[in-house]
Amino acid sequence: MDDRRRARLEVDIRQIVGETLSRSVSDERLRNVSITRVKLSRDGSHATLFYEAAGTETERQDAYEAMKSARGYLRSQLASKIKMRTVPAISLVKDESGEKGDRILNIMRELSND
């Protein structure tokens, strides 16, 4: 698969999974989850979903468990909405870049107040 097609599919997968999470998933633990990035393997057989979950640490852990259990459903939604020969297997990675950015901004604010 060429790089342009893979990049386009990554965007499509991110959009489909994001819409599915916000519209058709009944699990309340997934309401504060957003997909930040998708990385598709070169052959398109595997998609890594990077996600952020808002809330306390317990709520984030619950969101991770809910995401793990929803992988099959998300994959079936991809199969019905995306044109690929094979639907990629899904793995999950918690994206901590937002949290790290918040910490850096707080440190910068503290330094500017001193």
Image: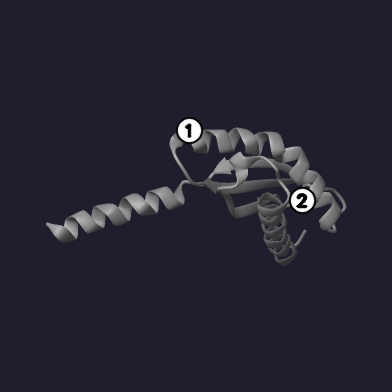
User: In the rendered image, which quarter contains the C terminus?
Assistant: bottom left
Q: Quadrant of residue 67?
A: top right
| Residue type, label 2 | Asp
User: Which residue reaches farthest left?
Assistant: 114
Q: How is the image coloured?
A: one colour
Q: Which residue occupies the foreground of this view, 65 or 48?
A: 65
Q: Secondary structure at mark 2?
A: loop
Q: Earlier in the sequence, mark 1 or mark 2?
A: 2
Dot 2 surroundings within 10 Å: few (below 14), some, or many (20 or more)? Answer: few
- With 62 as the anchor, is 82 left or right in this view? right
Q: Secondary structure at mark 1?
A: helix
Q: Which residue carries the number 2 mark?
A: 43
* Residue 51, x across and y down, in percent: 57, 48
* Residue 16, x across and y down, in percent: 72, 57
Q: Are marks 1 and 2 in contact (CB under 8 Å)?
A: no
**What residue do we see at 44% from left, 39% from top?**
56
